[in-house]
Amino acid sequence: MAARKSPRKKEMTLLLVEADVLVRHALGEYLRACDIIVIEAVDANDARAILVAGPEIDVLLSDAQLAGEGGGFALAQWVHRHRPEIEVMLTASLEHKAQTAAAIVARFPHCKPASDATKLAAKLSGMLAERKRRLRQQPKTAPAKRKRLRA
């Protein structure tokens, strides 16, 4: 007699909308560590295009202060009108983004993330501070002038 496979719990698919590539990458990796499928978008327009394409999304995690047409709040309203089955979570500060990601991960008791919300927020702050420091250190050189060729 063949053994019956136990029904596998459905994975969560999350649409992460964040303009800052460092923050988006760190949050995405944190969530993926718990086998959450993460689809990334840079802004509300990208997010709407993904949602219109129709993939099954369980949660939308978005920065409330997105640039572009209406920002995160307008995106949330659009999702409530057109895809009401999607849970919408808006965030603002780095700490709030980290706490929200940790709350999502906490839904999976089998998952033990490498860090908690406080450590994730500290990592995000450190990454952004390092980027700012490196940008300040870049030499400010004038573009090279082209010499005109005289005929």
Image (cartoon, grey):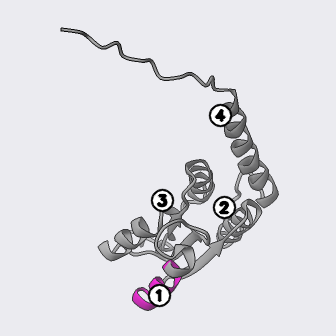
Horizontal side of residue 76 vs 26, given as left or right: left
- Name the spot of residue 8 as percent of width and height, x first: 47, 71
- The residue to which callout 1 is attached is 85
Q: Which numbered disc, 4 or 2, marks the residue that appears first in the sequence? A: 2
Q: Mark 1: which secondary structure?
A: loop
Q: Alpha-carbon distance for marks 1 and 4?
A: 42 Å
Q: Amino acid at mark 4?
A: Leu
**Marks 4, 3: nearer the viewer:** 4
- Foreground residue, 16 or 142? 142
Question: On residue 42, which mark appears?
Answer: 3
Q: Alpha-carbon distance for marks 4 and 3?
A: 21 Å
User: Magenta segment, which residues?
Assistant: 75-84
- Name the spot of residue 149 as percent of width and height, x first: 25, 10
Residue extending farthest to the front is 151
Q: Amino acid at mark 2?
A: Cys
- The residue to which callout 4 is attached is 135
- Name the spot of residue 60 as percent of width and height, x first: 53, 74
Q: Alpha-carbon distance for marks 4 and 2?
A: 36 Å
How many other residues sit within 10 Å of disc 2, few (<14), some (14-19) or many (≥20)? few
Q: Amino acid at mark 1?
A: Glu
Q: Mark 4: which secondary structure?
A: helix
**Marks 1, 4: nearer the viewer:** 4
Q: Mark 2: which secondary structure?
A: loop
